[in-house]
Image (cartoon, rainbow, N blue to C red):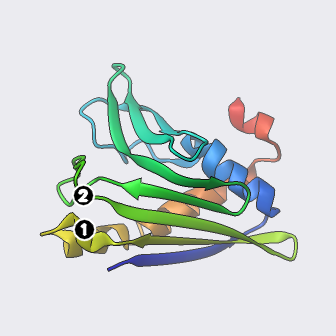
Amino acid sequence: MKVNREITVDAPVERAFEVFAEHFDTWWPRSHKIGGADLREAVLERKTGGRWYELGVDGSECEWGEVLAYEPPNRLVLTWHIGPDWQYHADQASEIEVSFTPAGGRTHVTLEHRHLERHGEGAAQLRDVIATDDGGWEGLLRLYRGVLESSSSAAELMQ
């Protein structure tokens, strides 16, 4: 059981990967969190074996998963330990693979969220939610593209 989404962005592959992975917090919505506190920062550690988590405004941390592959500028693979109840489950993990392919000065971004059946009962419901246009991967990729295409440099993202 999986969800696939694709977009083409107006940026070279290196820049597309950089904004997705290195500036993850600039496009991740504050509403997409699992902790009790408001989201201060969405963190994606830039290394294989790294963590993927949220920092709350109160200093709390909530794990989302791990970085299985960090291969700039072509590929990123993450585990997703968030179940249908929107809580962290150490024993349940689907995978998200994002690939970046050059497309004539632009970049084709493919996202596959796979192995959703590993989340057990409620996996179909989880798939339906993350497949939606608004709050799911389709909407998230539109937010990513908006930040990527409106920024002219990495320094601009950091301001």
Amino acid type shown at disc 1 = Arg
Q: CA distance from mark 1 to mark 2?
A: 6 Å
Place of residue 70 in the rendered image (x, y in percent of width and height, measured from the top left): 61, 52
Quarter of the figure with the C terminus: top right
Which residue is most to the left?
121
Residue 125: quadrant of the picture:
bottom left
Residue contact between numbered discs 1 and 2, judged by CB atoms under 8 Å: yes
Pointer 2: what residue? Answer: 92
Q: Which mark is residue 118?
A: 1
Residue drawn 39% across the image and 72% down it: 114
Element on which disc 2 rests: loop
Q: Is residue 26 left or right of residue 41?
A: right
Mark 2 closeness class: few <14, some 14–19, many ≥20 residues within 10 Å: some
Question: Above or below — where is 31 with respect to 137?
Answer: above
Q: Which mark is residue 34?
A: none
Place of residue 153 in the rendered image (x, y in percent of width and height, measured from the top left): 82, 43
Element on which disc 1 rests: helix
Mark 1 closeness class: few <14, some 14–19, many ≥20 residues within 10 Å: some
Task: Tell me which label, 1 or 2, sits earlier in the chain.
Answer: 2
Place of residue 155 in the rendered image (x, y in percent of width and height, measured from the top left): 79, 34
Residue drawn 75% across the image and 70% down it: 107
Residue drawn 27% across the image and 36% down it: 35
Q: Is residue 124 left or right of residue 74?
A: left
Residue 9: quadrant of the picture:
bottom right
Residue drawn 76% across the image and 47% down it: 151
Q: Nearer the viewer, residue 98 or 12?
A: 98
Residue 147 appearing in the image: no
Q: Nearer the viewer, residue 50 or 127?
A: 50
Place of residue 8 in the rendered image (x, y in percent of width and height, measured from the top left): 69, 73
